[in-house]
């Protein structure tokens, strides 16, 4: 018996616009219920929606990054939706003419290879609000989220394991964050996943396909991976008990995910498109885009994170880890490359950016180019460490100072007495003095026993003391080697 898992993913990504898709209401999180609403998103009769152009730009930028064709002509459609969290009773979406289609995304697999997952389409639509039934003595509808721009991305069923689903979702998160089109914050529900799963089973020369199950509304990578794994197990188990458990006999169905029990539960038979009663939205004009505008947007896409990461590893010999940290945000990658443009030393610059720059940026919840240190300063600092002018620990102090001091790091180091003493003859004189005062340590080193290491450390410490910590330890060690060999 041969079993193959087949999964296609639908992903909704919330776009990081300031306002909603068809009205001027603010996109907020955690605001008092129904505080970011207006007649348009409340679905009052007679109101007219106006499209948010930034939302469209963000979608096109993402479509391009997903290697999609961008439609030159699109329109909006109404999708019948009769629930209290969308009071218009329809959702404005794109049905037969999505803004982008026929793309693909490459995902890195654990064995180091990459896999191409084809994208059927990506379209723009509005979100519904939230019904709240828990923690209150009544149910409540909060319409703050109603009308939020969502990009819906639909893949071909090219995924063949729970892990691949999770990797694709995580790569997409990195991509939209890198493009600056979404915060893609999982805690705030900015990404929601709906895997469509079934199995191809070949047994006794016969092929079976189990019913396609769509697991609705998953909001974590973990739930996505676990629910697909659960469906793999459940569908095979059902088929083993009953070979009539097939797509032809049972069609498609929607299931929900119970996070506590870690299992999917049947919700309903799946609607076909005609059940939604799609029809063209009469209140919005169609969208036509021209070459010039498309070129402008294309220019904002640039090199994508996965390609950039590969390039950083090859061109700068960075570790896989450093390369992925530095390419997680466009601002970080640009800062890094501007810093190495000063004097090179990519590994040293990578350390300064990740260990000092990003640490501070995270604390302040900003990007690394906003902490007050310039890429040029970091590039110069890397050179000072590399040529022995200052020690790595002094560099930490200089970095700290540069946050509020825009002078070059050498000036700062000099002013703070952080320049290492690398003048060999001066250090030699000090070392000679130290050796005369401490004959026992010298004897210990010459004896070559287990006291050697300690004695060397002691002598180095004495030189450090006499130079107020500014002796270049590498040079002192060299001198020690020469004098005591
Ligand atoms: Zn509104
Ligand atoms: Mn949708």
Image: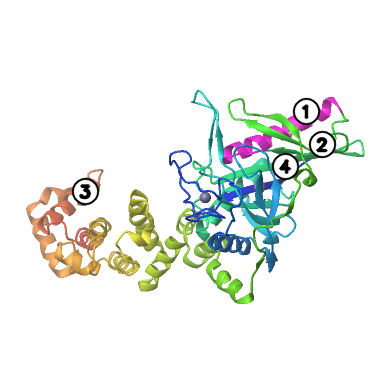
The first of marks 1 and 2 along the sequence is 2
Is 480 or 107 nearer to us in this picture?
107
The residue pinned by badge 1 equals: 237
On-image quarter of the C terminus: bottom left
Q: Residue at x 49, y 42 (%)?
A: 188
The residue pinned by badge 4 equals: 196
Q: Residues within 10 Å of mark 2 (few under 14, many from 20)?
A: many
The residue pinned by badge 2 equals: 210
Closer to viewer: mark 2 or mark 3: 2
Closer to viewer: mark 3 or mark 1: 1
Image: 267 above or below 45: above
Is 237 or 142 nearer to us in this picture?
142
> Which segment did they paint magenta?
216-242
Residue 141: quarter of image:
top right
Q: Is residue 451 magenta?
A: no
Label 2 sits on a secondary structure element that is loop
- Residue 187 position within the rendered picture, expressed as x and y whole percent measured from the top left: 49, 41
Q: From this viewpoint, is residue 422 visible? A: no
CB within 8 Å, label 3 to label 1 = no
Label 3 sits on a secondary structure element that is helix
Q: Residues within 10 Å of mark 4 (few under 14, many from 20)?
A: many
Q: Is residue 240 magenta?
A: yes
Image: 101 above or below 362: below
CB within 8 Å, label 1 to label 2 = no
Q: From this viewpoint, is residue 283 visible? A: yes
- Residue 262 position within the rendered picture, expressed as x and y whole percent measured from the top left: 62, 28
Q: Residues within 10 Å of mark 1 (few under 14, many from 20)?
A: few
**Relative horizontal placement of residue 152, taking residue 188 as reference (left or right):** right
Label 3, label 1: how far apart the Cα atoms are: 74 Å
């Amino acid at each position: 018996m041969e079993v193959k898992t087949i999964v296609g993913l639908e992903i909704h990504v919330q776009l990081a616009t300031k306002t909603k898709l068809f009205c001027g209401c603010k996109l907020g999180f955690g605001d008092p219920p129904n505080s970011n609403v207006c007649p348009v998103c409340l679905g009052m009769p007679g109101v007219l929606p106006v499209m948010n152009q930034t939302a469209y730009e963000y979608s096109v930028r993402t479509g391009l990054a997903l290697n999609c064709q961008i439609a030159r002509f699109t329109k909006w459609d109404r999708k019948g939706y009769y629930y209290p969290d969308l009071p218009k009773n329809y959702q404005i979406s794109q049905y037969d003419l999505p803004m982008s289609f026929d793309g693909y995304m490459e995902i890195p697999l654990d064995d180091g290879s990459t896999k191409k997952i084809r994208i059927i389409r990506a379209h723009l639509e509005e979100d519904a609000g939230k019904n709240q039934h828990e923690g209150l003595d009544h149910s409540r509808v909060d319409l703050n989220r109603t009308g939020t721009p969502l990009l819906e991305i639909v893949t071909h069923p090219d995924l063949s394991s729970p892990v691949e689903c999770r990797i694709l979702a995580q790569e997409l998160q990195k991509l939209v964050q890198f493009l600056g089109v979404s915060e893609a914050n999982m805690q705030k529900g900015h990404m929601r996943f709906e895997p469509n799963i079934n199995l191809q089973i070949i047994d006794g020369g016969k092929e079976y396909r189990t019913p396609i199950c769509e697991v609705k509304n998953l909001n974590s990578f973990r739930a996505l991976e676990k629910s697909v794994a659960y469906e793999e197990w459940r569908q095979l188990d059902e088929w083993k008990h009953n070979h009539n458990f097939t797509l032809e006999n049972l069609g498609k169905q929607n299931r929900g995910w119970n996070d506590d029990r870690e299992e999917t539960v049947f919700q309903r038979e799946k609607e076909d498109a005609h059940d939604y009663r799609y029809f063209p939205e009469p209140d919005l004009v169609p969208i036509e885009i021209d070459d010039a505008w498309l070129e402008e947007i294309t220019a904002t896409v640039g090199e994508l994170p996965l390609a950039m990461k590969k390039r950083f590893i090859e061109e700068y010999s960075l570790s896989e880890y450093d390369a992925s940290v530095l390419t997680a945000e466009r601002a970080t990658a640009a800062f890094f490359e501007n810093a190495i443009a000063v004097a090179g030393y990519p590994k040293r610059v990578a350390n300064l950016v990740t260990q000092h720059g990003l640490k501070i940026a995270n604390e302040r919840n900003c990007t690394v180019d906003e902490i007050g240190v310039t890429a040029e300063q970091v590039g110069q600092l890397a050179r000072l460490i590399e040529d022995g002018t200052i020690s790595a620990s002094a560099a930490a102090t200089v970095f700290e100072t540069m946050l509020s001091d825009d002078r070059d790091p050498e000036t700062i180091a000099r002013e703070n007495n952080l320049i290492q003493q690398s003048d060999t003859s001066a250090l030699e004189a000090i070392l000679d003095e130290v050796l005369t005062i401490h004959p026992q340590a010298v004897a210990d080193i010459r004896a070559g026993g287990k006291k050697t290491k300690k004695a060397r450390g002691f002598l180095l410490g004495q030189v450090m003391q006499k130079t107020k910590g500014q002796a270049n330890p590498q040079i002192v060690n060299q001198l020690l080697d020469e004098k005591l060999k």
